[in-house]
Image: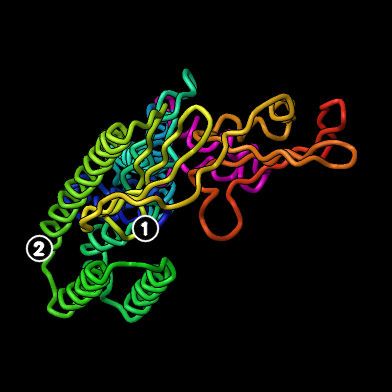
């Protein structure tokens, strides 16, 4: 999920009783909820390196065991340094902070698993990808749920109000840029924002905020389970729809679309092509073809391109690989994409290109 979601989940956890377990509970929960994204630094080094490394080592079982210990140690060192400077006793309770760190860190790969990008839970022992296919990477309903208690608790100053208004405005703009957002989602979004503002104006006691945070997290978990179940149902219904028409296939992905919880984007892979459907449970004709079929090109040029050093990261990341081979006067150009993202408007992400000579040897970049 996006960094705002991870941060708000950690902050929302901090507004429950968990935030009262120890001094420094809130920063531990917020930092822990973001800690696995340490691998984002690879994005500033090399894009292909990032594709091969992201959602791997720092999201796998070894990191889930080690990161909470490191985070707790750093928090406790900070606590001791502050206590020494103030001439007071340390306030952190290491055992409780460690428990909170484990909860927060574990929330991150679980949330990331819910979208189509996937997570490698078993790294570094096994590089297999796991996909939840349940939520788009930015989900406005999740934003509302995890933001409610946090906004109510931390908007008591003018600066806080301005900051939250700016964030709410930016999120509303993003929702507008998505396009094709159903009226019901817009009404729910605006009603949710109005409800948060009303709660802030009325004022909520600390016990009320704790109850609100707990209820919001429970509602978020229920929503995520429903979306995951919906994607599983959509894949099963797509398989039945295809079978009734005599179509054969190797794999089906039923993925989410932004701000459209009752719609699924269906990718169907058969032996030679990718086919694309849209399933809308609110339409009488639930299935429609959403795009032209794409050929799953292969052959010697593709095999040679996949040996190039600068595409080894994307090779690890591909789920539904799409290769385009273009003949040049002195060789070939092979473009490597993934149909999960290649059909979206704007520049394809990611899009790697390998140029080959006539002997099918990759040219240096």
**Mark 1 highlights which residue?**
258
Quadrant occupied by the C terminus: top right
Residues at marks 2 and 1 touching, judged by CB atoms closer than 8 Å: no
Q: CA distance from mark 2 to mark 1?
A: 32 Å
Q: Per the image, is 55 magenta?
A: yes
Q: Residue at x 27, y 54 (%)?
A: 280
Q: Secondary structure at mark 1?
A: loop
Q: Is residue 97 in sight in this rendering?
A: no
Q: Is residue 327 left or right of residue 347?
A: right
Q: Is residue 16 in sight in this rendering?
A: yes
User: In the rendered view, would you say 168 is above or below 28?
Assistant: below
What range is drawn magenta here? 33-62
Q: Residue at x 9, y 63 (%)?
A: 208
Asked whether 179 or 215 is in front, the reply is 179
**Residue 249 badge:** none
Nearer the N terminus, badge 2 or badge 1? 2
Q: Is residue 48 left or right of residue 90?
A: right
Name the image quarter holding residue 128.
top left
Q: Please identify the dominant SS of the magenta region.
A: helix
Where is residue 231? Give x, y as percent: 28, 42
Q: Residue at x 41, y 73 (%)?
A: 173
Q: Is residue 6 left or right of residue 198?
A: right
Name the image quarter holding residue 324.
top right
Q: Residue furthest front?
A: 246
Q: Per the image, is 131 magenta?
A: no
Where is residue 257? Give x, y as percent: 36, 54
């Amino acid at each position: 999920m996006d960094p705002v979601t991870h941060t708000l989940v950690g902050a929302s956890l901090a507004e429950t009783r968990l935030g009262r377990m120890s001094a420094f509970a809130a920063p531990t929960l917020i930092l822990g909820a973001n800690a696995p994204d340490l691998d984002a630094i690879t994005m500033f080094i090399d894009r292909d390196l990032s594709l091969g490394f992201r959602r791997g080592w720092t999201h796998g079982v070894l990191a889930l065991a080690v990161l909470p210990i490191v985070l707790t140690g750093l928090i406790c060192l900070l606590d001791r340094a502050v206590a020494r400077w103030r001439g007071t006793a340390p306030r952190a309770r290491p055992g409780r902070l460690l428990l909170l760190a484990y909860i927060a860190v574990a929330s991150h790969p679980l949330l990331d698993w819910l979208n189509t990008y996937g997570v490698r839970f078993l790294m570094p022992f096994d590089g297999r990808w796991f996909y939840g296919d349940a939520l788009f990477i930015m989900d406005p309903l999740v934003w509302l749920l995890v933001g409610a208690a946090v906004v109510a608790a931390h908007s008591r100053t003018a600066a806080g109000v301005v900051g939250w208004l700016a964030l709410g405005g930016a999120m509303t703009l993003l929702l507008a840029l998505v396009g094709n957002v159903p009226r019901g989602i817009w009404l729910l979004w605006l009603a949710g924002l109005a409800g948060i503002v009303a709660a802030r104006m009325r004022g909520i006691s600390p016990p009320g905020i704790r109850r609100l945070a707990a209820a919001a997290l429970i509602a978020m978990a229920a929503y995520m389970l429903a979306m995951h179940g919906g994607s599983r149902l959509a894949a099963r219904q797509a398989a039945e729809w295809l079978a009734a028409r005599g179509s054969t296939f190797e794999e089906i992905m039923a993925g989410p679309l932004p701000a459209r919880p009752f719609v699924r984007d269906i990718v169907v892979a058969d032996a030679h092509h990718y086919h694309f459907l849209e399933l809308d449970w609110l339409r009488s004709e639930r299935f429609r073809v959403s795009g032209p079929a794409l050929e799953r090109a292969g052959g010697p040029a593709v095999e040679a391109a996949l040996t190039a050093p600068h595409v080894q990261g994307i090779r690890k990341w591909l789920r539904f690989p799409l290769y385009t081979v273009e003949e040049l006067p002195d060789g070939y150009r092979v473009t490597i994409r993934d149909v999960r993202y290649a059909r979206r408007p704007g520049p394809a992400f990611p899009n790697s290109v390998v140029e080959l000579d006539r002997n099918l040897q990759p040219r240096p970049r």
